Amino acid sequence: MSNGKKKRKRPSGSTSTYRAPAQAERPRRGLLDSILAPRTPGASPMPKLRTTIAKGTLTALGIPGLLIAIPVVLLLVWVLLTLVGFQGPFTALGVTFAIPPVTTFADAQVAGRAFRAAVDAKGLASTLPGFVGLAGLLLLHAALSAVIATLCVEQLRTGGTSSWALRRALRVIRTTAAVGLLGLGLLVAGNLVAALFGSIGVILGLVGSMVVGVYLFGFAPAIAADEDRRVSDILIRSVRASRMPGSANLWFAIGYVLLALISVVAPLPGSEIGVTPSISAWAACILVNLFGVLVQATLVYRYLVVAPEVPEQPPQRERAAR
């Protein structure tokens, strides 16, 4: 060559002097991706929290029958509980329209105070009334959650509500009951953690178990109301929807659980033991339960927005390059 440099030989069988860049393996999704992953425009199909909270609020407030049902249901529940011996605190009714396992946390306390065994009862007879009462309260919350989910789904899909929601709720209650049982299991595990680690265990165990329950299974009622799936598929799909990166679902669950617990333990009107709640106690209880309904409507809206984007199957791992 004229420049005096020798021409480099190509490797045998090579068709190019450039080596193709190695493709980086797709990073494996972790448990905290939904909270730690940065949110960039278009990164997640889930709308922002402010948008979903506003839309969920408008959805719930646009169903007059649902708003009327809140004080009516609270009155009926209070009358039934007082008939079986419950004497307070009245603030325990503040989670009547909440989301499991927050409802389960209060149900265990209410069942222990309202459904007492006989003084001389022993063995199974001493524990059976409490279990029966707890099961009844779990079914009550499952029915309320099923009705709220179906009403909100129909309102968002059609712009109105009809008797279809009540008929559909009979199918949805299977899912909401399963969510309640899962919430009970999470609370049991949380109590064990609290017993082992003391005061720090209360945060890690009890509060953490409620956050996990709301985070992973909060979309299950909406899925059951909107789609025809088996209960197991609904629960799995709820977990996949909750773990969408950048969706802030975990932040949403943490904020809701903290506010719900504050409403239970705060010295609101009616926190004193008594069977004759004041007008202010009823007003505070209705407002707290209205907040629970708004949160459920928000979760319904958040799922319906991202439903087409939730994968039917978990993403397959890419095979390593040979």
Image (spheres, rainbow, N blue to C red):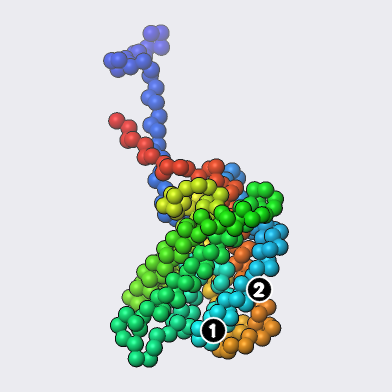
Residue at image location 58% in from the left, 85% down from the top:
271
Residue 144 x, y percent position in the rendering: 56, 65
| Location of mark 2 (residue) | 71
Residue at image location 32% in from the left, 80% down from the top:
124
Pointer 2 local density, CA inside 10 Å: few below 14, some 14–19, many at least 20: some
Q: Does 282 sit above or below residue 304?
A: below
| Location of mark 1 (residue) | 83
Q: Does 310 sit above or below residue 88?
A: above
Residue furthest bottom in the image: 119
State the CA–CA distance, disc 2 to disc 1.
Answer: 18 Å
> In this orientation, does residue 173 appear?
yes
Q: Quadrant of residue 108?
A: bottom left
Q: Does 89 sit above or below residue 56?
A: below
Residue 46 x, y percent position in the rendering: 57, 49
- Label 1: state its secondary structure: helix
Is 244 left or right of 302, judged from the image as shown? left
Residue at image location 50% in from the left, 47% down from the top:
228
Tell which of 231 and 8 is nearer to you.
231
Q: Earlier in the sequence, mark 2 or mark 1?
A: 2
| Amino acid type of the residue tagged 1 in the rendering | Leu
Residue at image location 41% in from the left, 44% down from the top:
314
Tell which of 265 and 9 is nearer to you.
265
| Amino acid type of the residue tagged 2 in the rendering | Pro
Residue 138 x, y percent position in the rendering: 47, 69
Tell which of 227 and 49 is nearer to you.
227
Residue 9 x, y percent position in the rendering: 32, 14
